[in-house]
Image: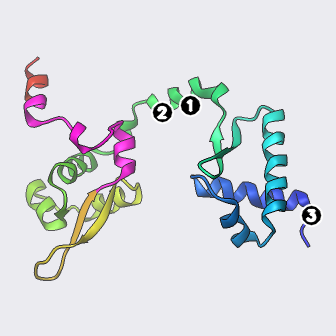
Amino acid sequence: MMEDREKRSVLEALLFLSGEPITLSTIGNVIELPEAEIKRLMDELMAEYKERNAGLLIVEIANGYQMVTNPEYAQWVRKLKSTNVLMRLSFPALETLAIVAYKQPIIKAEIEELRGVNSEGVIKTLLDRRLIKIMGRKEAPGKPLLYGTTREFLQYFGLKDLTELPTLKDLIREEAA
């Protein structure tokens, strides 16, 4: 039988790992505890985080619980996020990502035709970073995988949706300015 301290630690691990709101019933299915006990433990954890004014907080949101950064430290979080995030992607990765964003759904062969080089490694990197995803298979010989952008892609570039991508005219105008 686990002690409360250990149960709270398990809850912390689940919250940290999930990255999105997790419901009492989902937690209950994982750690096999009654929802009332999980609720009590969550309330204790939330109070503990709030009391020590930690960099992270546990909040009740969207019918579940989520670990979030403490708004009190938002200026540093914003500063980290703004430190030239695009530099984390290589030029080949950005080039491939642009091709996928504008031509999706697109297969690897079409990307490679546009780039003129093998793109397997770059595609794997973009999939690993969840900036692109497999959208299905093309009805063609060999049924090649179709790639498209993800919600993370939109978040990464601060876009509401794909219609906010600049057009070729916008890019030419910016270059001329």
User: Is 56 drawn above or below residue 117 in the view shown?
Assistant: above
User: Is 109 drawn above or below residue 153 in the view shown?
Assistant: below
> Of tags 2 and 3, which is closer to the observer?
3
Looking at this view, is 29 or 74 the one in front?
A: 29
Looking at this view, is 155 or 77 the one in front?
A: 155
Residue 140 in the image: state x and y as whole percent. Answer: 11, 78
| Residue type at tag 3 | Glu
**Label located before the other in sequence (3 or 1):** 3
Q: Is residue 86 magenta?
A: no
User: Is 141 drawn above or below residue 92 in the view shown?
Assistant: below
Give the residue displayed 65% in from the left and 59% down from the top. 23
Q: What is the spatial separation of the Cα atoms under label 3 and label 1, in whole angstroms? A: 34 Å
Residue holding disc 1: 77
Write the start and end of the magenta stretch as one range.
Answer: 149-171
Residue holding disc 3: 3
Give the residue displayed 69% in from the left and 39% down from the top. 56
Asked if residue 33 lies left or right of residue 30, the reply is right
Residue 69 in the image: state x and y as whole percent. Answer: 63, 37
| Residue type at tag 1 | Val
User: Is 9 drawn above or below residue 75 in the view shown?
Assistant: below
| Residue type at tag 2 | Lys
Quadrant for the C terminus in the image: top left
Residue holding disc 2: 81
Residue 160 in the image: state x and y as whole percent. Answer: 33, 39
Asked if residue 138 lies left or right of residue 4, the reply is left
Judged by its main secondary structure, the magenta piece is helix
Asked if residue 170 lies left or right of residue 66, the reply is left
Q: Are marks 2 and 1 in contact (CB under 8 Å)?
A: yes
